[in-house]
Amino acid sequence: METMTCEEFELRGLDADRADANPVEAAAAAQHAQICARCGGLLESWREVKSDLRLLREATQLDSATARVEMRLKQELRTRREARVPRRTVVIASWALAAAAVLAASVGWVRTKMMTIAPVSVAPFSAQMSGANTNDSNADGSETLLAADYDGGEFTQLPGSLPSEFGQNSILQVRIQRGALERFGLPVDPDQATEWVDVDFLVGEDGQPQAVRLHQDTLLAGMTQ
Amino acid sequence: MKIPDEKQDVLLKRAVRGDEQAFLALYQKHQPALYRYALRMTGSPWAGEEIVQEVFLLLIREPQKYEAARGELGAFLFGVARNRVMKYLERTPRELSLDVLNTDGSAWREPQDPLTPMMIAEKRERIEQVREAVLELSAEFREAVVLCELEEMSYEEAAQACACPVGTIRSRLHRGRALLLAKLELLRDAPRRASAGAK
């Protein structure tokens, strides 16, 4: 076994008692301390100090910060959490608002588009009477002097139907024989009953036709015959 | 409180989202060691608590400063605590009050072993003397003594904590021990054979 010099002992000899000490060095240090009075004294003094350090360590081993620190940190955590929740709510609300605006704009655009494509208005049934004023809304719907070939760009309300808001109706385009219009209460010239005509029906929410409109070309064809 | 057996980075993520239980689990795991280190380095329970508080406030406010890829959370927290301790020592280099250690009872616990009052008093005096001697060391030597002798870290662990080579820690500890021996001889008014080491 190699022995240590006093210089080496001063550098590494006091590590001999450490848990992670090199066993060879520890043995050499112990051997040197036995033969050298000065280094032996140094080791003895250090062991005494180390004992005191152990006392200090044991006295403070269970020390920890007081509850005040924990309370302060918990308070900070809560403050930050509470601040985070409204921020998240604002973000969600902003997105919801934007989505609602887009939806409203879309609905508005679709409605406007429909109005532009089919500017439909329904003339009162009485307006189709010969020589009658189209603004005469007091006319009785039971009138029978009707012209099935009427087409002034407006719908002719069918007898017995009640006018409703356009937004709830839909338009049905069909090609039928003129005589079929009789079923809807419209008078038809028997000579033209077999003619095929293009007709727009204004169909109500209940699926029942409320008004009718003949296409202009059909009308012209009917008039020339 | 039952500490969930989860990885610390998972606990940290939960804590950052505001999970109090997760935060407390981390706090209770790391706080005692950080506090003891700060207390032993500063000698002041008040400063120790302030430092611990600052460390965990940083974790709450700027969790992104901790990168799991660069090391464990404990090492990160210790590094932050060490910076705070060094700043504190720079601000108050020689204002280490020894009296404050025993005023609130947090830094001193009465020994529980069955000793006579005389023995208790003697033990307490010895502890006070060694505490005073440690606090009189310069910060770098004190840190080596605190980490290697009081916290019982290995040289490698202490070197990692101080971000310096193992040789530096060995050298600081060697010098710190010698100074400690000399100071204790002076305090106890009993010169011994070890004084040569403090030269």
Image: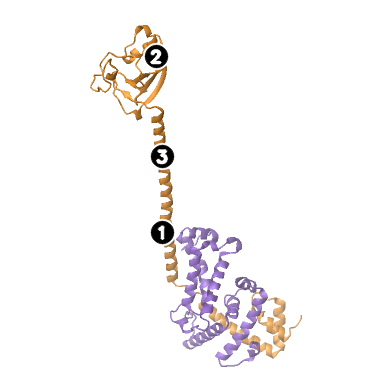
Location of the N terminus of chain A by quadrant is bottom right
The image shows residue B19 at horizontal and vertical percentages of 46, 59
Q: Residue furthest right?
A: A1
Q: Are marks 1 and 2 in contact (CB under 8 Å)?
A: no
Answer above or below: position of B168 versus A143: below
Classify mark 2: residues with Cα within 10 Å, few (<14), some (14-19) or many (20+): few
Location of the C terminus of chain A by quadrant is top left
The image shows residue A17 at horizontal and vertical percentages of 64, 79
Q: Nearer the viewer, mark 2 or mark 3?
A: 2
Type of amino acid under label 3: Ala
Q: Nearer the viewer, mark 1 or mark 2?
A: 2
User: Which chain has been coloured orange in this picture?
Assistant: A
Which label sits on residue A82? Answer: 1
Q: Colour of chain B?
A: purple
Classify mark 3: residues with Cα within 10 Å, few (<14), some (14-19) or many (20+): few
Answer above or below: position of A169 versus A73: above
Label 1 residue SS = helix
Q: Earlier in the sequence, mark 2 or mark 3?
A: 3
Between marks 1 and 2, how big is the CA–CA gap? 76 Å
Answer above or below: position of A35 versus A103: below
Say which residue label 3 marks: A105
